[in-house]
Image (cartoon, coloured by chain):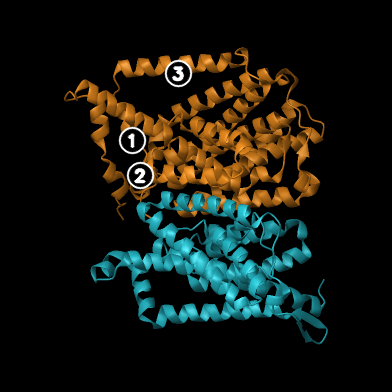
Chain colours: A cyan, B orange
Amino acid sequence: MLEPVFLAQQVLNGLSFGALLFLLASGLTLVFGLMRIINLAHGAFYMLGGYIGVVVAGLTGNLLVAVIAAIVAVGATALIVEVGLLRFVRGQELPEVLLTVGVSFVIADLCLAIFGGDPRTLPLSAMITGSLQIGNLTYPLYRIFVMVVAVVIGVALALVQNRTRVGAVVRAGVDDREIISAMGVNIRWVFTGMFIVGAALAAIGGTIGAGMMSIRPGIQDEVLLYALVVVIIGGLGSVPGAAVGSVLIGLIDAFAKAWIPDLAYFTIFAPMALVLVLRPTGLFGKAA
Amino acid sequence: MATKFVETRTIRTIGAPRSTRTRLITIVVLVVLLGFAVALPYLGTTSYAMSLVTTIFIAAILASSVNFLVGDGGMASLGHAGIAAASGYGAAWATRQGMDAWGQVTIALSITIVVSLVYGVLSMRTSGIYFLMVTLAVGMVIFGLAYRLSFVTGGENGITGIQRPPFLAEYWMFYWFILGIFVLTTLLLWVIARSPFGASLRGLRDSESRMRSLGYSVASYKLGAFMISGTIAGLAGLLSVWHTHFISPSAAGVHRSVLLIVMVILGGVGTTFGPLVGAAVVVLVENVLSNAVERWPTILGLIFILVILFARAGIVGSTQKLIRRIRRRRSGTPPGDTDLHQETAIPDGELTARKELP
């Protein structure tokens, strides 16, 4: 239970799962930060991205093409959802959330109709195979790759948000919608763009995540809940919070599954409850 | 977090006087409907149909507990299926220990109260989206426990063979019993909504900060409301396992909680009979339409989206609006008409556009 190799393995498991969670949670939290919408269809976007990624990877044998195909398909879906539905209920909290619930129902059911009920994983031809060997520890390279992707995307998000004009517009939109629109920025299209970026992150997570856990009916609720827990712990709207929350939940989940599998589900919610009671806005969140 | 929840019309209808004729018609219609419901087993209804109607009433009890929280408290819970399931598991566990019906009821209700307290304490300091997520997450804890603690809950297979008390063994007896409970809970919630407590709750819904500055303890009102709602949800959970003799983790799943919100919105938030209508639509789509159409979750999702976009007041709320409009047109809108007064007391736009003061 406490051998160094075992511990190292669990730490790596936790970090790689945390990396996947970050891809999911960063999209959720970015969309919330700007638009004040909790997108409960985020899990369904992940699912759709995963299925499309798996199918395209099977056809082409190329992971990059699969990811791009998933981003395009999910991004187009998100565009339709945002422009066709969410705009009509802008600013009304509950209708916005509930619309995304309806969207999630429809997407998940159509996925079941199109892709069937069998669990799907990335074909080996599109995956990075092989494993890393350090002393007694062997670890699949693919999971290391997932961590690298998450770090790259996290750094890219931080750079775009803090160093570019687009990022400045987004930050201004988070702080004061009225002023930024008075200054001549069409905030509606900024919202649409952000919603698509959030969905694209879910699609990347879905495709890459399909190499770690299978895409199957019901996965949309499962990943959505992990993502929600992460953003509640990290603080809604905060990307650094999402990063910290993902690593925390990833590690807790890995060790709980190894040590107390009977309570594996409970252990990720206990820290969340603790954070909510002690600091309702999350570790990095600002008061609403 | 200042923007409005689903548009509700209770503020207007409560204080304003209604014409005695409207009230009389309402009472007559309700008595006729109730008489029909009581007579249903005699009308040659098959036992399958009776079972379906029983399911609808149980779902309606559960949905009305959610409706009370959303409509009067402005708190949208996505975890109520968890409370109902906890209560159901309590009854199931008691059966397995060989307890009689009273044992089942005692265990189920104690678990309900403890679980509601946990939900309430964790969520009482939050509102809006945060409330929604906290209840969602606590509901998932219950789902997780039901799934993993297999020595108590039977894991994925659940628990079967739960027996209801002998005097309810026949399906029509059980139906009348459920009907009675439905009428009682609806009355109870109706009375609570019109009590000073209900009025304070609506005050919270409309502006938490104003209520706080008036000296109300916001958290304790929210906790109180949650306890009332949770107890009714637990009752529905017990009735549900008595009906199906079975419980499994999916009873606590997010999907069930989401369906409850769907029922409430479909029927009409804050209306007395909205939950019943919403429950009927959802249960029928789930049980009858699913035999004919394979893609029923898509249809349910589309109905839900359309209702949110075009009929925010839900089926019952929209019908009430329509009736009011027709009647006004027929009577030629006499000045000082009470219904007109009710309609204009709070304009539609203001409800959705008004922001909470800091």
Is B74 in front, or is B218? B74
Is B16 in front, or is B339? B339
Q: Can you name the residue that lies furthest to the front here?
A: A59
The local crowd at label 1, few if under 14, some if 14 to 19, many if 20 or more residues have their Cα within 10 Å, is: some
Residue drawn at point x = 81 percent, y = 87 percent: A135
Q: Quadrant of residue A179?
A: bottom left
User: Are labels 2 and 1 assigned to the same chain?
Assistant: yes
Residue drawn at point x = 23 percent, y = 22 percent: B330
The answer to whether marks 2 and 1 mark residues whose Cβ atoms lie closer than 8 Å is: yes
* Lower sequence index among marks 2 and 1: 1
Q: Quadrant of residue B292?
A: top right
Which chain does the numbered disc 3 sit on? B
The answer to whether marks 3 and 2 mark residues whose Cβ atoms lie closer than 8 Å is: no
* Lower sequence index among marks 1 and 3: 1
Q: Amino acid at mark 2?
A: Asp
Give left or right: position of A92 versus B58.
left
Q: CA distance from mark 1 to mark 3?
A: 23 Å
Give left or right: position of A181 versus A11.
left
Residue drawn at point x = 57 percent, y = 47 percent: B119
* Lower sequence index among marks 3 and 2: 3
Would you place residue A12 above or below residue B75 in this image? below
Q: Let me know if residue B16 appears in the view.
A: no
The nearer-to-camera label among 1 and 3 is: 3
* SS at circle 3: helix
Would you place residue B177 above or below residue B6 in this image? above
**Label 1, on which residue?**
B11
**Label 3, on which residue?**
B30
Q: Amino acid at mark 3?
A: Leu
Which chain does the numbered disc 1 sit on? B
Q: Can you name the residue that lies furthest to the left here?
A: B335
Residue drawn at point x = 81 percent, y = 35 percent: B96
**Label 2, on which residue?**
B206
